[in-house]
Image (cartoon, grey):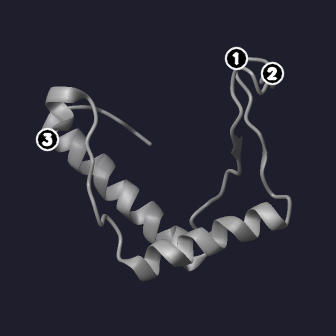
Amino acid sequence: VSLSTHGFFFRDDLLPAGDANRIRSEAMGLVARGALREAGFGREGKTDARVRGDQLCWMEKTTAGPGTRVLMSLFERLRQTVNRELYLGVSR
């Protein structure tokens, strides 16, 4: 499925299984340590699980685990490719 045609795409096996397992393990560690917080919405950062029920944790590449850094690098390459191929100016 094409991103430019449908606005989304699917890619099986985007990451090797070892990387995917490492990322999952790091994410579950964040959950276990209570590092996630309720995601907010609006300028005030209101929280309401009926509107937005996810949790998040902002992180920098310098403090992320090795698996998460692999994912961040993949997302950066994706951002660059989308900008180049679809003439966008996505900055992050």
Question: For residue 53, which quarter of the picture?
Answer: top right
> Against 6, is 65 above or below?
below
Residue 87, horizontal then vertical, whole percent? 17, 32
Mark 1 or mark 3: whose residue is earlier in sequence: 1
In the rendered structure, are the residues bearing label 3 and label 2 in contact, judged by CB atoms less than 8 Å apart? no
Near mark 2 (Cα within 10 A), the count class, few <14, some 14-19 or many ≥20, is: few
The amino acid type of the residue labelled 3 equals Glu
Residue at left 52%, top 76%? 21
Is residue 63 visible to the viewer in this orientation of the structure?
A: no
- Asked if residue 23 lies left or right of residue 6, the reply is right
The amino acid type of the residue labelled 1 equals Gly
- Asked if residue 86 lies left or right of residue 53, the reply is left
Q: Which residue is mark 1?
A: 42
Residue at left 37%, top 55%? 76
The amino acid type of the residue labelled 2 equals Lys
Mark 3 or mark 2: whose residue is earlier in sequence: 2
- Asked if residue 41 lies left or right of residue 9, the reply is right
In the rendered structure, are the residues bearing label 1 and label 3 in contact, judged by CB atoms less than 8 Å apart? no
Q: Which mark is residue 65?
A: none
Q: Which residue is mark 2?
A: 46
Residue 71, horizontal then vertical, whole percent? 45, 64
In the rendered structure, are the residues bearing label 2 and label 1 in contact, judged by CB atoms less than 8 Å apart? yes
> Against 8, is 15 above or below?
below
- Asked if residue 15 lies left or right of residue 57, the reply is left
Quarter of the rendering occupied by the C terminus = top left
Residue at left 54%, top 68%? 68
Question: In 3D space, how far apart are the residues under numbered discs 3 and 2 (Cα atoms)?
Answer: 36 Å
Residue 10, horizontal then vertical, whole percent? 27, 47
Residue at left 32%, top 47%? 79
Q: Which residue is mark 3?
A: 85
> Against 17, is 90 above or below?
above
Q: How many marks?
A: 3
